Each structure stands twice: as structure tokens, then as C-alpha cells.
Image (spheres, helix red, strand yellow):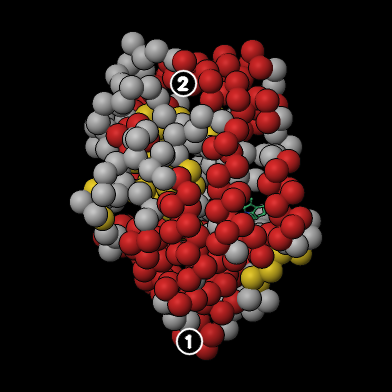
Amino acid sequence: MARPKNDDFLRALLREPTTRTPLWLMRQAGRYLPEYCETRKRAGNFLNLCKSPSMACEVTLQPLARYDLDAAILFSDILTVPDAMGLGLYFAEGEGPKFERPLREEWAINDLTAPDPYDHLRYVMDAVVEIRRALDNSVPLIGFSGSPFTLACYMVEGGGSDDFRTVKTMLYSRPDLLHKILGVTADAVTAYLNAQIESGAQAVQIFDTWGGALSHAAYEEFSLAYMQRVIAGLKKTHDGERIPCIVFTKGGGQWLEKIADIGCDAIGVDWSTDIGLARQRVGDKVALQGNFDPIALFASPEAVAKEATRILDCYGPGNTGHVFNLGHGINQHTPPENVRVLVDTVHAYKRK
Ligand code: CP3
């Protein structure tokens, strides 16, 4: 199978030369787009949207129809994996994700097993196949998963949290139980990402959204080690093409050298890290992805262009190794016109 017509995104991740700096945006298909809100209304709710391959395909393509983005990302959610593990995911209107059966009891933790992705997550694989067909090799498709630790946060807390009191209490008082959860979840994530790759995902990203909430000592043991285990089990090629893997630990700027050592091809960085210094720190070991503050998209078009240029200048010369992105997901109230300014500024930029 050949590379897509526009393969700048894959080239940048593999540190091959590119014609321009490629970009995509975390959560590029979402509520800031009126057409997304329309489809979501038709679906009835967010989970129905995720579980319908044809509607998931439709919303995946929406941001690409509007903007000249260099990659598509599968429309789904990281919490489909714990849902498939039997925790009962639901979204209470305006309250974010929740689980009917959070993981708290020792017996439930001991009973936890990794689901077969082709069975319990078939709808995700069907969506990947349908999206690849619709993209017709124009741009690459990114598959994704939550990191074992980030998934464990939601599984143990039963939903989002400000302080992660329940999961961190488990970490300090019963580390054996948390390790049990993380081990099974790492197996689940590995099988899930491999199934996405076999179904047609051309790169994968691991979202370690809450790794940065851990202490310096705990990050390595409870988040990084399990991402390393996932990456060790990933298919590195499919249909003769390398499948690059991106690790995004929000708040992980202080651990870049350690993250660069776990076998990933690229590191996602949030806006709190200087991307030029990050580049010096990782050298040519990995590519970097980021790191525009998503809230800067609320400023004037001139300010958006200026901030994007600052980041491109900060990354520095050389025509590879940088995938432009936001430092976290796009905010639902973002003005869509400013996204166009961002995309056009990045593509018009000439590297020195
Ligand atoms: O990037 C993309 O366009 C792909 C789609 C995607 C979604 N969620 C769609 C979504 C991806 C990659 C995710 C990942 C995800 N989901 C993460 C990791 C990335 C991150 O943002 O840190 C996390 C922590 C989740 C869990 C989750 N899902 C939360 C906390 C919420 C509620 C947040 C909110 O803004 O209300 C969701 C729901 C969700 N996932 C939405 C979308 C578009 C909004 C749902 C809606 O339409 O109401």
C-alpha cells in the first residue's frame, strides 16, 4: 500500500524531509464546528455518534472539508476501552464522562480482563475502514488510545476529577492494585491500537492526558513504564509502511528525555514547554508535535498568526521533525475563522 498523496505528516514524524510544516489539531472534529453539532443532534448523543461507523466517518471528515489539514484523526473517545471492559460508560448532559461501575473493589480489579477489540470494539474498526475508504489516500488517518494511566484515572474515579483523590490514594496505599489495573489496561490498549493499525490507521497517538498529575517519582513507575510496554507490543509496520507512534503526556515537559527513550517516534508537547529547547533536549531521537495554546485561538486573527509564527521560529530551521498542533484539545467555543488563519499561517511559513 502506497503512502497517501499528502504524506508530510508521516514524513515529519519519521524525520524525513517535508515540503511544508504539516499540521492537525487535537479534537479537530468537535463542537466548535456547527456541522458537528448538527450530526451529533441527529445521533441523539455523543456515544451514539462514536458507535455509528458512518456518522463517526462523517464527523472525522468535517474539519478536512473546511481546512487544509495534513491528517485525519479517527472520531471516537479514549473511554470506549473501559466501556468495552464492562464499566458502563455514559455521558450525563453537561457533566462529562461517567462510569456506572467504577473500579474500586479488589474482586472487581482481579476480574478485569482485556477485551477483544474485534468483538467489543468492532464499531471502531468498522469506522477506521470506512474513513480510510472515504479519505481515498488523500491524507493519513491517525488512530489513538488513552494511556493506561489516564484510562485508570477515569476507571477508578468513575469520571473526571480535579484532584484524582481516589486513584492516587490507591497508588499510595495499594500500589499492587493499581499495577494490576494498569497491566490489564496496557494489554487492552496494545490489542486495541494493533487492531486499528490492521484496520488502516497509518499513525497512532497515545493520549496521556493525566500523566502530568503524577509526582516525579510516580510518573515513571505508573505511567511511562506502561506506555513503554504498549509501544513494545505495537506493530511497527503494516502493508510495508512504518506506523509512527506519538506519545502526548500533558504537563510532561520535564520528562522529555525519558519519554524519548520508550520507543516512540514523536512526542506531543503542551504549550508550557519551549519547543526549541525541547528540540535540543531530544536531539534527533524523536520528532515533536505541538504546541500552540488552544486559548490563543480566541485572540484576533493577527495575534493568532503572530503566535503561530513564534512557535515555528522557536522550533527553528530544518524542514522536518515538527508536526504543528495545539498543546491540548481545541476549545468548544473557538471561532472557526481563527482556525483557518492558523492553518494558513503554518502552511505559508517558510523554514530557514
Ligand atoms: O481529536 C479528535 O478530533 C478525535 C476525537 C477525540 C474525542 N475525544 C472526541 C470527543 C479524541 C482523540 C478524544 C480523546 C479524549 N477523550 C481524551 C484525551 C485527550 C484530551 O482531550 O485530553 C480524554 C481525556 C477524553 C475523555 C472525554 N471525552 C472527556 C473528558 C469528554 C468531555 C469533554 C468536553 O469537552 O465536554 C469527552 C467527550 C468528547 N470526546 C467530545 C468530543 C468531540 C465532546 C462530546 C460532545 O459532543 O458532547
Q: Residue at x 55, y 66 (%)?
A: 80
Secondary structure category for the residue under label 2: helix
Numbered label attached to residue 169 = none
Q: Which residue is mark 1?
A: 111
Above or below: residue 270 compared with residue 348: below
Residue 255, percent across and down?
38, 43
Amino acid bearing label 2: His
Mark 1 nearby-residue class (10 Å; few <14, some 14–19, many ≥20): few
Q: Which residue is mark 2?
A: 347
- Is residue 160 left or right of 212 when viewed as pictured? right
Residue 275, percent across and down?
42, 27
Residue 221 in sight here: no
Q: Nearer the viewer, residue 296 or 28?
A: 28
- Quadrant placement of the C terminus: top left
Mark 2 CB in 8 Å range of ligand 1? no
Task: Decide which of tag 1 and tag 2 comes sooner along the chain.
Answer: 1
Residue 173, percent across and down?
51, 72
Cα separation between marks 1 and 2:
50 Å
Q: Residue at x 61, y 57 (%)?
A: 55
Secondary structure category for the residue under label 1: helix
Amino acid bearing label 1: Asp
Above or below: residue 94 compared with residue 12: below
